[in-house]
Amino acid sequence: MRRGSINRSGETARVLILVGLLLQLLQVLAFLFIGIVLAIARYLSELLIALAIVGFLWIALVYLLSYARAASGDYEGARGPTLLFAVLSLITLGLIAGILYIVAYVKLGDATMGPGVLPRRAGASTGRGSITCPVCGQTNPPNSSYCRGCHDPLR
């Protein structure tokens, strides 16, 4: 990646993880609030408060293993946990957060590819028969129609 350039896929993934994390925080706070309000129904209240505590632990894990890694630029390290959190969120009815984590997982994959070496001239073909994208500098296979890095047309 060029010095000073922004990895848009990585930044997008970071924002998606943060939004999913915030949505789950709202869900956990709702459980906690309802649990406190329903203190008269002893067992239901205890169950909701327990779910809220587990939710706070979950949010801490998402932050540490996924968001913090993506924010620091460790996109490859954030991919696995992000996919795991996506699947677990979908299973536990955190549908919107799960979908956001899946999109973040894809964006983290895009971010790990990163742009290639800048070409000497736009649309230049390297000596190995590959095509260099004139927009982002990503090196692509010779039969590519679209860039693997920025998805712009190559021809």
Image (cartoon, rainbow, N blue to C red):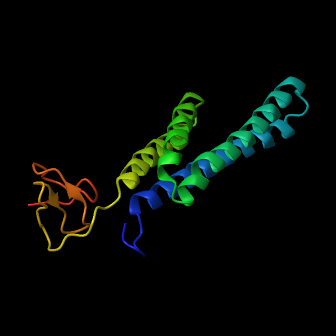
Is residue 153 visible in this depiction of the protein?
no
Rendered-image quadrant of the N terminus? bottom left
Residue at x-position 52% and y-position 32%: 87
Residue at x-position 10% and y-position 54%: 129
Rendered-image quadrant of the C terminus? bottom left
Q: Dividing the picture into quarters, in which one does residue 149 lie? A: bottom left
Residue at x-position 67% and y-position 43%: 61
* 88 or 127, nearer to the observer: 127
Q: Dividing the picture into quarters, in which one does residue 135 lie? A: bottom left
Rendered location of residue 95, percent (x, y): 52, 37
Q: Is 70 drawn above or below residue 48 in the view shown?
A: below
* 121 or 35, nearer to the observer: 121
* 153 or 45, nearer to the observer: 153
Q: Is 70 drawn above or below residue 41 in the view shown?
A: below
Specify whether 127 is left or right of 61: left
Specify whether 57 is left or right of 148: right
Specify whether 76 is left or right of 63: left
Is residue 86 visible in this depiction of the protein?
yes
Rendered location of residue 57, percent (x, y): 74, 40
* 106 or 114, nearer to the observer: 114
